[in-house]
């Protein structure tokens, strides 16, 4: 830490001040405010980035909540996504002027994140921006879209193809769900999207959904251990009872990719879908997946996985001082698609 700070002092960076969203918590207080920081207040890392865009995810909503249990040490700068330009590097893999993005790892959880005009991160977390993506597009995708892409690839790796039947996408108006709908539609799948927001049916059809189900349709009061076979695959960022229903209705040999728990962390099911239908339940981790896999997925997100409706997936573009209010809406499920933070 001291040697790195010495480098930045020698290069004249420590006098630079910048704005960041800072959350702080005391014994009986909690605050979310835009503050002015110095570069020498940033955590250790080989790459200094001038952040152009970030985005708001469910974890960011938790970080801005005093009861969110995401942030361990205060004061802290949240933001689990960022895209920007390298302004200084002590690692030979990256040079000044390189466009880059960072998602996952400890960013915005235990390491100062993307809700900041500057970020300093370990070089091993940094992904070069693919040629066919802009910095803004990378953050429309962000962690949510990256998770969706990992989920779609997991279906492909288990030999799920469009001819086998429809794919159910739960929580379809959220960041993961909406990107999954768009990617699957582009790949030729018949997508059945479920949502609790009747007002967004048109939006989901625009993304490529062939059929739309209500939340109640995929979360009945009584879930049978084995029900009628419906889905060749499922992309589920919701969990809870909806995942239990998906398990009971997935076709023989089908695959479910689960990545979230907005519907609850508990899962009430039986072994029958696994031993009678050979259903695969695959966990999707977008935080610590290998850099080799991470780069491959981002390259696909700039090519065959790149949603054709990226611009329509943007719910809004906000500034630092609007994050707190938007984060609350994210937790309340009042946001569809993606919210960008422009630095």
Image (tube, rainbow, N blue to C red):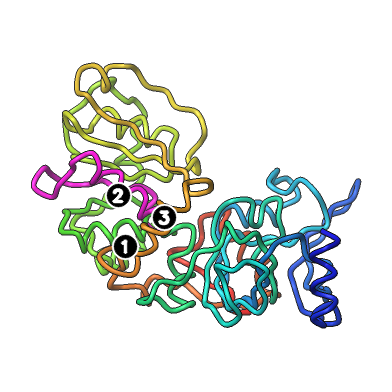
> Residue, x 25% and y 28% (percent of image)?
279
The residue shown at (48%, 77%) is: 136
Q: Which residue is mark 1?
A: 300
Considering depth in this image, is 310 or 10 the residue closer to the camera? 10
Label 1 crowd bin: few (<14), some (14–19), many (20+), radius 10 Å: some
Query: Residue 316 at x, y = what percent?
Result: 50, 75
Q: Residue furthest front?
A: 92
Q: Secondary structure at mark 3?
A: helix
The number of discs equals 3
Q: Is residue 45 found left or right of 199 in the rendered image? A: right
Q: Is the Cβ of the residue at disc 2 closer than 8 Å to that at disc 1? A: yes
Q: Residue 85 in the image: state x and y as whole percent.
A: 58, 78
In magenta segment, residue 162: yes
Specify the segment rendered in magenta. Answer: 147-174
Q: Is residue 37 magenta?
A: no
The first of marks 2 and 3 along the sequence is 2
- Residue under the point 28% across and 52% down: 193
Task: Give the alpha-carbon distance from disc 2 to disc 3, as whole Å.
Answer: 14 Å
Query: Which residue position is annotated with label 2?
Result: 153
At mark 2, the secondary structure is helix
């Amino acid at each position: 830490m001291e040697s790195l700070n010495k480098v930045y002092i020698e290069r004249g960076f420590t006098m630079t001040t910048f704005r960041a969203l800072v959350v702080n918590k005391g014994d009986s207080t909690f605050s979310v405010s835009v503050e002015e920081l110095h570069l020498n207040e940033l955590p250790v890392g080989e790459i200094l980035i001038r952040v152009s865009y970030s985005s708001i995810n469910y974890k960011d909503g938790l970080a801005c909540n005093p009861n969110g249990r995401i942030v361990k040490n205060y004061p802290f700068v949240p933001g689990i996504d960022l895209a920007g330009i390298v302004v200084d590097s002590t690692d030979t893999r990256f040079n000044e002027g390189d466009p880059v993005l960072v998602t996952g790892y400890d960013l915005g959880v235990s390491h100062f994140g993307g809700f900041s005009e500057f970020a300093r991160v370990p070089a091993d977390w940094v992904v070069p921006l693919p040629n066919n993506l802009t910095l803004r597009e990378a953050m429309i995708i962000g962690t949510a879209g990256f998770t969706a892409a990992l989920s779609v690839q997991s279906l492909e790796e288990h030999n799920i193809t469009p001819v086998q039947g429809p794919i159910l996408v739960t929580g379809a108006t959220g960041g993961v769900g909406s990107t999954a709908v768009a990617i699957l539609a582009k790949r030729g799948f018949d997508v059945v999207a479920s949502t609790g927001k009747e007002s967004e049916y048109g939006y989901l059809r625009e993304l490529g959904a062939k059929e739309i189900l209500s939340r109640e349709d995929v979360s009945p009061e009584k879930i049978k251990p084995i029900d009628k076979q419906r889905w060749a695959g499922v992309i589920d960022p919701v969990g809870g009872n909806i995942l239990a229903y998906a398990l009971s209705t997935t076709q023989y040999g089908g695959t479910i990719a689960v990545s979230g728990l907005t519907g609850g962390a508990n899962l009430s099911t039986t072994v029958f879908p696994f031993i009678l239908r050979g259903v695969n339940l695959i966990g999707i981790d977008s935080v610590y997946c290998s850099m080799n896999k991470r780069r491959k997925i981002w390259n696909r997100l700039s090519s065959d996985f790149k949603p054709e409706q990226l611009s329509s997936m943007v719910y809004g573009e906000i500034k630092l001082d609007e994050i707190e209010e938007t984060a609350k809406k994210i937790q309340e499920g009042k946001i569809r698609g993606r919210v960008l933070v422009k630095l």
